[in-house]
Image (cartoon, helix red, strand yellow):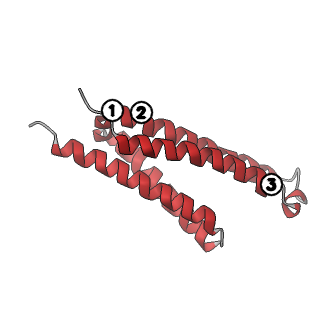
Amino acid sequence: MIPSSRSLQVSALSFAILSFGHTIGGKQWTAEPTFMHISGMKPWACGIIGWYQGSAFFLMTSLIHYQWSCNPHALQDPTNKAIAIITNALLWASSAWYFRTGIKENAWVVGLGATLQAWAVGRACLWQQGNAKD
């Protein structure tokens, strides 16, 4: 039997929290007067749907990490490795973009999520390699 991965469970929980926080953050910035001036226009619609797609991305990523935590061996599959790598790259790119645009609190939180995700996935992959049977 393959043991579960506590680090991937923590990563899954962090993404669930990120999803919730991201949704709350969207409610805050969409209430700003500047944003309300473009209400009903294309940038407004794209901004809203894009933001909440981000919240759904975090929730979906939480579920994937939970699945991996139950079966860390799944990370040996090339498709799952690709998902983990793309997720991490997206998180780092988002964190960098937030820093460049001066939204430091989001940059730190997303960067922390990227670090935790890389640590959890890397730990699970290294553990699997160390316990592989020839």
Of the image marks 3 and 2, the number of the one nearer the N terminus = 3
Q: Nearer the viewer, residue 1 or 134?
A: 1
Seen as rendered, the residue at the extreme right is 37
Judging by the rendered image, the residue that carries numbered circle 2 is: 67
Query: Can residue 6 be seen in the rendering of this structure?
Result: yes
- Marks 2/1: CA distance? 6 Å
Query: Can residue 50 be seen in the rendering of this structure?
Result: no
Q: Is residue 111 left or right of residue 30?
A: left
Which of the labelled discs sits on residue 107, or is there none?
Answer: none
Q: Nearer the viewer, residue 36 or 10?
A: 10
Q: Is residue 43 left or right of residue 61?
A: right
Identify the amino acid type marked 1. Asn
Q: Is residue 8 above or below residue 34?
A: above
Seen as rendered, the residue at the extreme left is 134
| Residue plotted at (74% across, 53% down) | 47
Seen as rendered, the residue at the extreme top is 1
Q: Is residue 19 left or right of residue 47?
A: left
Pointers 2 and 1 in contact (C-beta within 8 Å)? yes
Identify the amino acid type marked 2. Gln
Identify the amino acid type marked 3. Thr
| Residue plotted at (32% across, 34% down) | 4
Percent from the top left, x then y, of residue 131? Answer: 16, 40
Pointers 3 and 2 in contact (C-beta within 8 Å)? no
Give the class, few, some or many, for how many residues have Cα within 10 Å of label 1's Cα (few <14, many ≥20).
some
Task: Please tell me whether mark 3 sits on a helix, a strand or a loop.
Answer: loop
Give the class, few, some or many, for how many residues have Cα within 10 Å of label 3's Cα (few <14, many ≥20).
some
- Marks 3/2: CA distance? 33 Å
Which of the labelled discs sits on residue 30, or is there none?
Answer: 3
